[in-house]
Each structure stands twice: as C-alpha cells, then as structure tokens.
Amino acid sequence: MHKGSGTRTCDGVSFTVERGKTLAVVGESGCGKSVTAMSIMGLVQDANGFIEGGEIIFENQNIASLSKDKMQTIRGNRISMIFQEPMTALNPVYTIGQQIAEVFRNHRGMNRRQAMAEALRMLKLVHIPDPEKRLHEFPFQMSGGMRQRVMIAMALACEPGLLIADEPTTALDVTIQAQILRLMKELQREKHTAIIFITHDLGIVAEMADHVVVMYAGKAVEYGNVFDIFERPKHPYTKGLLNSIPSRTLTKAHRLNTIDGTVPSLRNLPVGCRFNTRCPLAEGRCFEVHPPLETYESGHKVACYHADKV
C-alpha cells in the first residue's frame, strides 16, 4: 500500500486468520497496523493512498480487485471494523438507535420499524442496560465503555465473517477494558467470527489471540501461534517487545528493558533489514537485503537471518 506522496506504508504483509479464531497484529505506533486494516476494508483510497499489488482473499475472492460499489456491499456487512475512539466514530447528531438501524437498512433492506427493532436487539446482545432508553440517546449521553459497546453492536449487526478491531480498548480504563474483551470473546464463540485484533498491548494479545503477526516499519517480521511468539520468539524485535513488558518482580534496583534507538521514518528507511539500526545481532547481509518472511518451523515464520541466535 502506498501513500499519495510515494511512501510505501505497508510492504509484503502476509497472514491468515481462520473463522472463529483471533489474529493479533502488534507493533509500535506507525508500523502499519491500522493501514493494514484500512487496506482490508478498502478505505486506503479515502486516505490518499492506493494498493499497488498483492491480494486480499476473503470468502474465496480477491477483494483488493473489487470496484468501490462491490466493496460497499461487503464493508459493514461481511467485514466490519471497530475503531479506536468511539466518540469520533459515532455521529453526534444522530441517536444510537438511528446509527445502528442504518446498518440494517443499508445491507438488509429493512424499513425503519424493522431496523429499529433489530437495533434494540443488538443493544441487548452487547449487554447495554436499559436498552429501550439508550436506543433514543445520543453518543454524548453515554460513557466511553457504553459507546464502545454500541460500536461492537454496529459491527456485528450483519453477523460479519471478519471483524477488525483497531485498538478498541485503548481509551478505556482497565475495568471497562476487561468487560469489552470478555464481550468480544463471548460474541465470537456465539457467531464463530474471525477477528483481527490490532493492539500494542501484549497483555491483551496473551488473553485474546490464537495467532500473532508482529509488524515493524511496514513489514511483517514474525508470525506464529501465540505460544510460540511469547515463549519462543525468533525475531530480535519481538524479543525486545516481550522483554519491555513490566514484571511484577521488577524492583527499584532494576531498570525496565527498552529497545535502543528509534523507529526509522518510512521516507528514509535503512538499506537491508529495517531493524538493523536497533538490532544487537545485525551484521553483513543485514545491511544489504531485507530478509524474507520464511518458515522457521511449522506454523512459525520469521524475517531474520539470525533467528537461531535469538
């Protein structure tokens, strides 16, 4: 995917997510997580970008090649997205009921009465108290946790095959965060929905994910099941992320581990591996050609020439 200025924002990102499973996409801010999600949704054109090549296979068709009109029938219907900040994602001048009902009217052809009845059902499904009253309220009248539940209700309204959650709990306190995560897992079990969960919180990854893809500077650098990623990371960047998680046993005498250096600008990437300026193992060909994402062992892929040393 390119931005209009010519910057390649995501390059060679490849992963699979199965129905009923959760794939976590992790990495630092600016690594391309959200752009990957926007590409799947067919929204990068609206962000002054375009998809240069590759495929996005969903339900046996390459949706990257679909027209805007055909993609419109899939977006919000078979593929839905929960955005990071519900206050900006919801329209402040329409009631909650009107906004959820719009999904049913657009994708199911329902009349207003039918759509509002379905909107009420969805509010009950996501455990919003007093749903009959909330149906006629505006977003500003609800708490952050309530608004995020509304976003989940809208996203699941048409029972999508794929749900993309872009840091849906970042703006919430830990208690509400736990409730939202529990709700998503509950609804996933009921609807057998595939979830792509975008986050930088590795604690959430451990709780939610079946598989993980780690991104760095627009590249996927490691992919595997959640156990392999946490217990046997094979990329220095993945290991650095895991080592930087605060431990309960950390004392004042010990400093929290950090990854040296800063993320390179996508306009001025280093030659070779994009992590080479921060990697303690970088040598020789690391500064010449970026390593491909290759299978290290069954189901575990890594883009590193020194995976055996990690």
Image: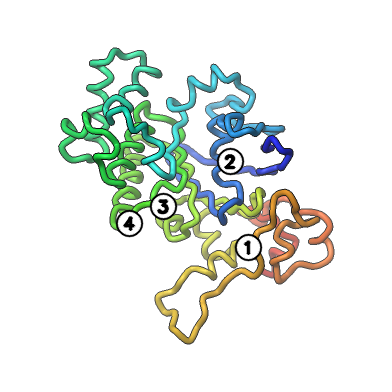
Q: Position of residue 156 (x, y in %)?
A: 36, 32
Amino acid, disc 4: Asp
Q: CA distance from mark 4 to mark 3?
A: 8 Å
- Which label was assigned to residue 237? 1
For marks 2 and 4, the one nearer the N-term is 2
Q: Position of residue 188 (x, y in %)?
A: 36, 40
Q: Quadrant of the N terminus?
A: top right
Per the image, the residue denoted by label 3 is 170
For marks 1 and 2, the one nearer the N-term is 2
Amino acid, disc 2: Thr
Q: Quadrant of the C terminus?
A: bottom right
Q: How many neighbours does mark 3 have within 10 angstroms: few (below 14), some (14-19), or many (20 or more)?
A: some
Amino acid, disc 1: Tyr
Closer-to-camera residue (87/221): 87
Residue 273: image quadrant is bottom right
Query: How are the residues colored?
Result: rainbow
For marks 3 and 2, the one nearer the N-term is 2
Per the image, the residue denoted by label 4 is 173
Label 2 secondary element: helix
Q: Residue at horizontal 60%, vertical 21%?
A: 66
Label 4 secondary element: loop
Q: Residue at horizontal 50%, vertical 56%?
A: 200
Q: Residue at horizontal 84%, vertical 65%?
A: 284
Q: CA distance from mark 1 to mark 3?
A: 22 Å
Per the image, the residue denoted by label 2 is 36
For marks 1 and 4, the one nearer the N-term is 4
